Image: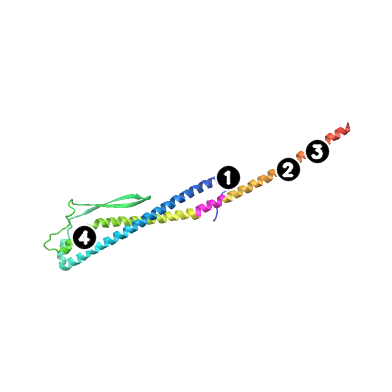
Amino acid sequence: MARLNVNPTRMVLTSLKNRLRVAVKGHKMLKDKRDELMKRFLELARVNKALREEVEEQIGTAYSNFVIASAVMSSEVLEEALMYPKQGVSIEVGKKNVMSVNVPVFDFKTTTDDTANIYPYGFANTSAELDSAIENLSNIFPQLLKLAAVEKEVQLLAAEIEKTRRRVNALEYIMIPRFEETIKYIQMKLDENERGNQVRLMKVKDMMLEEAIEEKQELTKAAIEEYRSK
């Protein structure tokens, strides 16, 4: 692993040690977040699967009723019966925060207070299958909105999991090893410098000791010669 290109000084060493502690702490937090996101994602995936199967089954039933209605009714009568819808809806889109991910929340309101008033035609010229199809679609609409919200949440969580996974891997396999390698390199260089300083100090001490010995010998020699001259 390539180390960082920095000067091997104690100040840089201290800074890198602080960055390493932050990176290790951030790595743990991101791993915990990734695990929680995965747990939430798997739960939603199961909910999404069950909800989709239920919705598809109900839509299949509605389509079957429409097919039967179109078989027993003329196309003109069927088109005229469905030409002017009697009930309308307005959709409100909100959001909620799930593990720092903003996911959509859908809600709807009908245009009339009577939610059961959904048939835009009289019952004299239409079949019971058309009534069942309209009722099925009306009942399934809230489930469709819920399914849309769940599937969007699953997509957003999957994207967040992938982004968090890349960050975890970047810290675990790139940043933290680089910090550790650089700290090891700086520590080694500082130890080498310290040993070099110790060697130089020992040499200076030896030189000073030799000078002191020579000076003492010269003083002793001078004292002896002065004594002899007397």
The amino acid on which the numbered mark 4 sits, given as a three-letter code, is Asn
Name the residue located 54 percent from the left edge and 45 percent from the top edge.
14
* Relative horizontal placement of residue 22, taking residue 61 as reference (left or right): right
163 shown above or below 222 = below
Count of numbered circles on the image: 4
Q: CA distance from mark 2 to mark 4?
A: 102 Å
The amino acid on which the numbered mark 1 sits, given as a three-letter code, is Arg
Q: Secondary structure at mark 4?
A: helix
- Residue 117 on image: x %, y %: 16, 55
Whichever of labels 3 and 4 marks the residue nearer the N terminus, that label is 4
Q: Secondary structure at mark 2?
A: helix
Q: Secondary structure at mark 3?
A: helix
Is residue 90 at all visible to an observer of this figure? yes
The amino acid on which the numbered mark 3 sits, given as a three-letter code, is Gln
The question of residue 194 being in magenta is answered with: no
Q: CA distance from mark 3 to mark 4?
A: 117 Å
Q: CA distance from mark 3 to mark 2?
A: 16 Å
- Residue 88 on image: x %, y %: 20, 54
- Residue 126 on image: x %, y %: 14, 63
Q: CA distance from mark 1 to mark 2?
A: 29 Å
Identify the residue under disc 1: 10
Whichever of labels 3 and 2 marks the residue nearer the N terminus, that label is 2
Residues in magenta, as a range: 174-183
Q: CA distance from mark 3 to mark 1?
A: 44 Å
The question of residue 182 being in magenta is answered with: yes
Identify the residue under disc 2: 206
* Relative horizontal placement of residue 148, taking residue 82 as reference (left or right): right
Identify the residue under disc 4: 136
Whichever of labels 2 and 4 marks the residue nearer the N terminus, that label is 4
